[in-house]
Image (cartoon, rainbow, N blue to C red):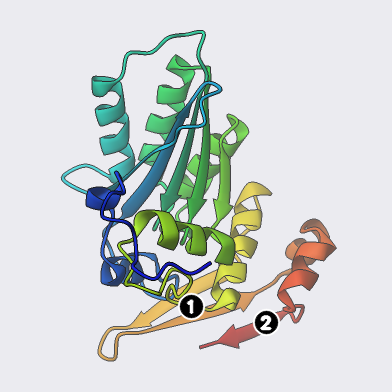
């Protein structure tokens, strides 16, 4: 059912929601905004209560801000599990990936799931290795799909009345391209996705080049799901 009035004024998360225009500029996978925005959820033990909030870069990256704030404000009980979900506009850099692994190693009862709209400087080998190390340590990292975008719009955005389901619709193709590149990172394959920008017109171009190693290593159903099975295809 679509809300007639937008988020309730009695909603405890209302003051922690961002505006629709912010959501659009931060999380559009086709735009390369430098700053990072994070939505996060925290759930303790068997409780059904979920704590939600949002954060942005300051002088530190948003992941480091979360860790510092979380450890400063929380008393940890080793016997109680904690489930954390992040929705990021950019994936962690290699330094943040290292900080996250160190944080989780100190709190073994924590489970972290990361959904990201884009891959941060994915051609950089340190960033690629950082994500692999993060995943190998037990962190789930996935590219945001339509389902996650819709979920974030409903739970983290101060959407207008009657527009609960009318979040900005992004191109599914871009989501699939990022997801394919994430598979390349996980499998230690060369990058297949190239992103370029023409600054004068502020246009962003995505090009995909698959080598033999990609065809040989990436599971066929992943390639087929994109519909992109030519050795070299370029989209605008």
The x, y position of residue 17, in whole percent, is 28, 54
Query: In the displayed structure, would residue 135 be above or below residue 161?
Result: above
Asked whether 55 or 53 is in front, the reply is 53
Query: In the displayed structure, would residue 229 be above or below residue 112?
Result: below
Secondary structure beneath dot 1 equals: loop
Q: Which residue is mark 1?
A: 169
122 lies left or right of 60: right
Q: Is residue 56 visible?
A: no
The residue shown at (59%, 86%) is 234
Q: Which numbered mark, 1 or 2, is in the foreground of this view?
A: 1
234 lies left or right of 89: right
Q: Of callouts 1 and 2, which one flags the residue occurring earlier in the amino acid sequence?
A: 1
The residue shown at (62%, 69%) is 176
> Which numbered disc covers residue 232?
2
The x, y position of residue 212, in whole percent, is 77, 67
Secondary structure beneath dot 2 equals: strand
Q: Is residue 210 visible?
A: yes
Q: CA distance from mark 1 to mark 2?
A: 27 Å
Crowding at label 1, few (<14), some or many (≥20) Cα neighbours within 10 Å?
A: few
Crowding at label 2, few (<14), some or many (≥20) Cα neighbours within 10 Å?
A: few
- Residue contact at pointers 1 and 2, CB within 8 angstroms: no
Query: In the displayed structure, would residue 211 be above or below residue 46?
Result: below
The x, y position of residue 7, in whole percent, is 34, 59
The residue shown at (49%, 58%) is 151
48 lies left or right of 190: left
The x, y position of residue 200, in whole percent, is 25, 90
Q: Quadrant of residue 173?
A: bottom right
């Amino acid at each position: 059912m679509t809300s007639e009035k937008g988020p309730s004024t009695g909603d405890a998360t209302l003051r922690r929601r961002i505006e629709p225009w912010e959501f659009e500029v931060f999380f559009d996978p086709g735009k390369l905004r430098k700053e990072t925005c994070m939505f996060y959820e925290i759930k303790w033990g068997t409780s059904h209560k979920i704590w939600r909030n949002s954060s942005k870069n300051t002088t530190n990256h948003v992941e480091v801000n979360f860790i510092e704030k979380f450890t400063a404000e929380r008393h940890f009980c080793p016997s109680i599990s904690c489930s954390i979900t992040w929705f990021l506009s950019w994936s962690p850099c290699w330094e943040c990936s290292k900080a996250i692994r160190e944080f989780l190693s100190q709190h073994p009862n924590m489970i972290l799931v990361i959904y990201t709209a884009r891959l941060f400087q994915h051609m950089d080998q340190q960033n690629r290795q950082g994500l692999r190390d993060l995943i190998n340590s037990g962190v789930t990292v996935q590219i945001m799909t339509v389902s996650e975008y819709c979920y974030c719009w409903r739970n983290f955005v101060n959407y207008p009345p009657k527009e609960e389901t009318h979040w900005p619709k992004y191109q599914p193709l871009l989501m699939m391209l990022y997801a394919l590149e994430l598979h390349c990172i996980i499998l230690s394959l060369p990058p297949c996705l190239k992103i370029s920008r023409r600054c004068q017109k502020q246009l962003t171009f995505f090009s995909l080049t698959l080598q033999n190693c990609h065809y040989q290593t990436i599971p066929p159903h992943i390639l087929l799901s994109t519909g992109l099975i030519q050795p070299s295809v370029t989209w605008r």
